Structure formats: C-alpha cells, structure tokens
Image (cartoon, rainbow, N blue to C red):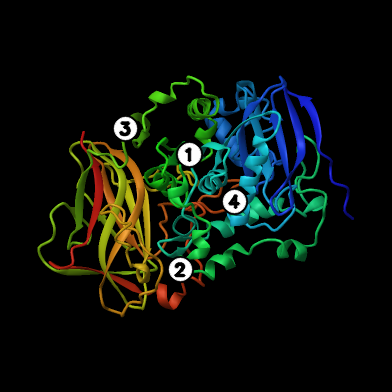
Amino acid sequence: MNVAFSPHRVEQRDGMFVEWNVPITAGDGLVLRADVFRPIASGRYPVLLSYGPYGKGLAFQDGNASAWSRMVAAFPETAEGSSNLYQVWELADPEKWIPDGYVILRVDSRGAGCSPGFLDPFSPRETQDISDCIEWAAQQDWSSGKVGMNGISYYAMNAWYAAARKPPHLAAICVWEGAADYYREVCRHGGIYSQFLENLYPRALLRVQHGLGTNGLRSRVTGELVSGPETLSEEELAANRIAVDRWILDRPLDGPDYHERSPDWTQVDIPFLSAANWGGQGLHTRGNFEGYLHAASTHKWLEVHGEAHWVHFYTDYGMDLQKRFFGHFLKGEETGWDKQPPVLLQVRHPDRFVQRAEREWPLARTKWIKFFPQADGRSLSTVSPERSFSLTYDADGDGLLFMSECFTEELEITGPIAAKLFVSSSTRDADIFLVLRVFDPSGKEVVFHGSNDPRTPVALGWLRASHRKVDKEKSEPYRPYHSHDEVQLLTPGEAVELDIEIWPTCIVLPVGYRFGLSVRGKDYHCDGPALSIPGVKYTLTGVGPFLHESSEDRPHDVFRGSHTLRVSPSMQSYLLLPVIPV
C-alpha cells in the first residue's frame, strides 16, 4: 500500500534553512524533487546545484560507510568543521558552504530518490532536466541568478553535459574527477566493453530507484523514505529503468547514441575547474584532460592529484580550490583566483606528492622519447632493434613484460602516452591491454592508491585490434584517437599496425628504479591475492570495477587465442613516453 508523499516543508536547523522535497517542474511536466539548504539571513545568494541518481536523502555514512570511515581515518580534516549530518556521497557538505553565502541545491534525478520517471542516467532527457533546474534556481527569491555545479564523478560528468546545453544562468562548473566521452571513457575502453556500469548500477543506483518505497532506505536526518513512498513491484521497477549493460552491448561501435551522451566541446564556454586523478585509470582521468584541452572556454583550469577519488574534494586543499574558484566567478570576490596557474599538478613520487604550477598541458618542455621492445623479450631501449623478431604470448596469460634499465638519475614521466605495436593473432581479432608499471631497486612492483583501487599501476591503455582505425584529424602523436565506427577483422597470422592510447599519468622515478611495459590479452592483475574490503562491492585486483571480462563481448574462441608481437625494419614497435627534463 502506498503512503502519501511527504510535502514540501521548511525548517531552521544547524544554522540554515532547509527546504525538503521542493517540487521543480521539468519541461515535460514531470515534477522532480529537491532539497534546498540556504543561509538564514535574507538575501540573494549564488547557487551550487547537483543533480544525480544516488539519493539526496542517503547519508554518505550509510550509503558508503566503508569509504567514509577510511577517508576520515586517513584524512581527519574531511570531517572537521561540520556535524556531518548532511553529508551525501560525492556532494558538497552544506554546513561548509552556507556560512560562505551559498545556497546548496540537491536534485534527485528523474527516476531516482524522490523524483519519479524513467531512470536513464546521462540521457539527453536528464541533461534537459538539469537545464530546467538551473533556470528554476535562478528565478527564486533567494538566488542571485548565478548558478554553479559542483560534485564528484557522476555530478562532474553531467556538469560537462549541462554546460554544453548552455542554460543561460549556469555561470561556472567544478568538474571533479568526472568522465566525458561516454563511449571511450565510460562504456568501451578502446572498443572493449567495460563492466563498470553493470557494477555501479546495483550498488549505487538501483538501491535508491524511485518506487522502492517501503522496501527502500531511510534518511538518517528526516527518517523519511529515500526513494519516496510509492512502492512498486520488481517488474514495475525493471520496466522503469534502462538496462544499461544491454544498451552498451547492443552498441559496439561509436555513433549518435553515444554522441548525445557526450559533451560537444565547442559549446562548453563557461569558466571551469577540471580536477583529475592520476590514479583514475578507467574513468576519472582522461575526460578531465580532454575537457581542459578542447572546451571552448577561455577561462579554464586543470588540477591533478592522487589518492582515493572522493578524498581531496573534501580535504582543506580541495575545499580551498573550490571556494576560491566559485568565490571569484559566482560572487565576484577577490579570492586570488586571478593569479591561479592554468595547470596545477600534484606531481607523483613513489612515496609522496609535490605541488607544481604549470602553464599548459601537455607540458611544453616535454621530451618525447621512444622506447623499443628488444628481441630478448624482456627489455626496453631507446635504440631501435636492428634485426627482425617475433614474440608470441597466450592471450589468457600474463603476456609480455619489457623492462627499462635501472635509472642512474631521477626520471619524471608526466603527460599522455602512446604506443605503436605490430601484432598478429591466431584468430580474427585481438584485445590489447597495455600497462605501464614501476619497479623498485629490488625488482618489486610499486603500486599506487588509485581512485577506485588501492593498488593501481601507473597507467593503462586498451585497444581492440579490429577497432584500429584512427581519426587522423583528431589524433596527436602522443594521443591517437580511434574512430570506432567500423570493424576491421584480422586475417589470422597477418600483422596489423596498432596505435594505442595510454591515459595520461605522472610518476617521478628515483635513482635505481625502472619502468616496465606489459603487453597482455586481458586485464592487469597486481601481484598477490585479490583484496576484499568490507563495503566495497567488487574485488580489488588493481583495476577496480573497470574490468573487461564479458563473455558476450569477448567470446573465448576469438579472444583467448595467441598474439604475436612482430618487429622488423619496416615494423617498429615502441612506447612513446613524455619525459620531463630535470
């Protein structure tokens, strides 16, 4: 039996006015529900808007208890200065923004939480909803008319999409570890189906789908049902949402359906701060760099850091960046942002990060150095091999590992990476997985705390050989861009030329360290057993939830054959690295 919807109500608590379940009518007449947190003093304030499917009423501590406890233990400052009662996963804490004169507006996306409708994340309908909410917020009597968007991951991604839609009152966005290209970054790495969304949906979206009602979760603040009072059957719920894995599997090539879920960079012309994670290989790296490079805005900044992907959004370091950025563009304050360097890097070392300001990306002083696999099947050298050779590996095994010499001087690798390989397969196709790895003087691999896995390698790249077609107009020598618009199957035993993008990275190798390139036919797996962390609903092997193991996308008779790396004077395979002079 369904119960009446909790009405829109206002209360004063914890130094702010809170409006629960504010109705916002979308352009097609559907009523979305939002929570509004605003200062007690009357006035008109800039608005920080978020719109997403994780449930505006689900506390961070309840929905992602493990992540919350690990973050607060490692970085106590993230919980300081707030009761943390209003913390929601990947969103700004109202108690840390209201005192600075902002309104925080949280909207449950269509089909999630208290908002009814068909759940279809990143769809054009959802982007239009965001635009409608922005314009609604701009017209309220507590609004200055300037709206910004802020949040991590999902909330960062749809900020790109909303900016490309150009709602008149969207004034600035902070894109914290999002993605952008729905095909290349979210759904299909190098054309290979990524299982990320099929993992994300059950653990983060379906648990708060609108219509769970009394079968759903409750807010620790209000005690009300996070997904609204309407209680639907499993069949009704399934019919009211996209089958995301089926959607992706049915669309192996890039095309209009993916394009309409990706931003048009020519239309993104408002100020933005793009914050990437070096350890975000698989989702939280490439899009932040692509947006910085290609968006039309003349007021844009890039910041890159490390650690788990929710951490620095909440640390003093991250809060300072966000507040100076929004204070400048939404409030016209003298925050020092006019002196902010265009690029701010937390340069990664094996044991620390060192902050450094830069003027551009990629760095203008980069020395692009080619490292060539050698005939011994074990080494990399800046000298190209003089004789022909071939190396065969089992696509279902550990592949090939080529190692550099130990460095006698410190070496910094910072920037985008590319590889050129000439490969043949025993079957009609091949999936190539490239891993840039680091080894200490004892030969032990050094791994890093990534955005979604505590043991990530330095960098990853992927390519399905039948998707090798390159768009020459969009490509750079250090960042090939694949069209993904046709399948070019292999002839077994015949080599093809593959230009492979490896996502941007940064590492400073101390004296005595080496780097290695793994060439594999399946996902990287770090040394040692897989980890299981309470509350983390995927097994941690070094790549987080970004696995590529679908038997439908990668049938065994095609992708479990053998691959052969071929080298000759006319087929020079190499790894192109961005080396930064000391």
The residue carrying mark 3 is: 358
Disc 2 versus disc 4: nearer the observer: 4
Left or right: where does residue 528 sit relative to residue 512? right
The residue carrying mark 1 is: 270
The residue carrying mark 4 is: 127
Label 4, secondary structure: give it. Answer: helix
Sequence-wise, the earlier of marks 2 and 3 is 2
Q: Residues within 10 Å of mark 3 (few under 14, many from 20)?
A: some
Left or right: where does residue 240 sit relative to residue 485? right
The residue carrying mark 2 is: 253
Does 93 sit above or below residue 206?
above
Q: CA distance from mark 2 to mark 1?
A: 31 Å
Sequence-wise, the earlier of marks 1 and 3 is 1
> Which residue is located at x 18 percent, y 61 percent?
376
Q: Amino acid at mark 4?
A: Thr
Q: CA distance from mark 3 to mark 4?
A: 33 Å
Q: Position of residue 475 (x, y in %)?
A: 31, 56
Label 1, secondary structure: give it. Answer: loop
Q: Amino acid at mark 2?
A: Leu
